[in-house]
Image (cartoon, grey):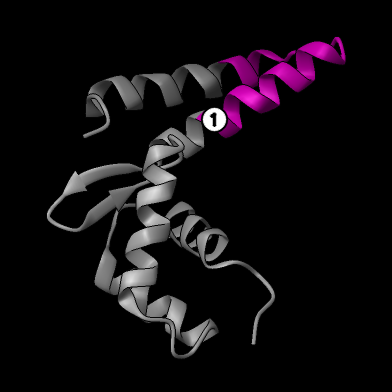
Amino acid sequence: MSDISIRTLILQFVDTNGANHIREMHIEILRQKPGTPEHTIRARLSEAVTDGFLNRLGEGFYDVYAWMLLRCRTALLRSQAEGTPSAAMRDQVNRARAVQVARGPVM
């Protein structure tokens, strides 16, 4: 069995595949952590939404744009602290913000 947490597996899956339904995520988690009940997936998804990592889109779908924006902001802050903020990094953060604004607030 994998030592990676269920929450990390969910975030990686949604980060790689984009918006997904809980059933699809459950199937993927079962491949790496057999026997994981769906209610555990639901609990980890709920935590990730509460913590601002995922958006709940409704009807069992979740998306990762808030997570992407957080990663971009973190990278930009790191590069600024190192004194090397690049225009490309600022553009990436601005694109992530535009996507988040276009998709609307977290449900």
Magenta segment, which residues? Answer: 70-90
Q: Is residue 76 above or below residue 6?
A: above
- Tell me which residue sits at (32%, 63%) in the image: 42
Q: Nearer the viewer, residue 18 or 9?
A: 9
On the image, the x and y values in percent for residue 3 come to: 69, 75
- The secondary structure making up most of the magenta span is helix
On the image, the x and y values in percent for residue 54 come to: 39, 43
On the image, the x and y values in percent for residue 23 come to: 26, 73
- Tell me which residue sits at (65%, 80%) in the image: 2
Q: Residues within 10 Å of mark 1 (few under 14, many from 20)?
A: some
Query: Looking at the image, which residue sits at the far left?
Result: 59
Q: Is residue 37 left or right of residue 91?
A: left
Q: Nearer the viewer, residue 7 or 72?
A: 7
On the image, the x and y values in percent for residue 69 come to: 49, 29
Q: Nearer the viewer, residue 81 or 59?
A: 59
Q: Is residue 86 left or right of residue 48?
A: right
The local secondary structure at tag 1 comes to: helix
- In this figure, which residue is indicated by the disc labeled 1? 70
Quarter the C terminus occupies: top left
Figure disc tally: 1
Query: Looking at the image, which residue sits at the far right?
Result: 82
Quarter the N terminus occupies: bottom right
- Tell me which residue sits at (22%, 55%) in the image: 61
Q: Is residue 66 magenta?
A: no
Q: Which image quadrant is residue 29 in?
A: bottom left
Q: Is residue 79 magenta?
A: yes
Q: Amino acid at mark 1?
A: Leu
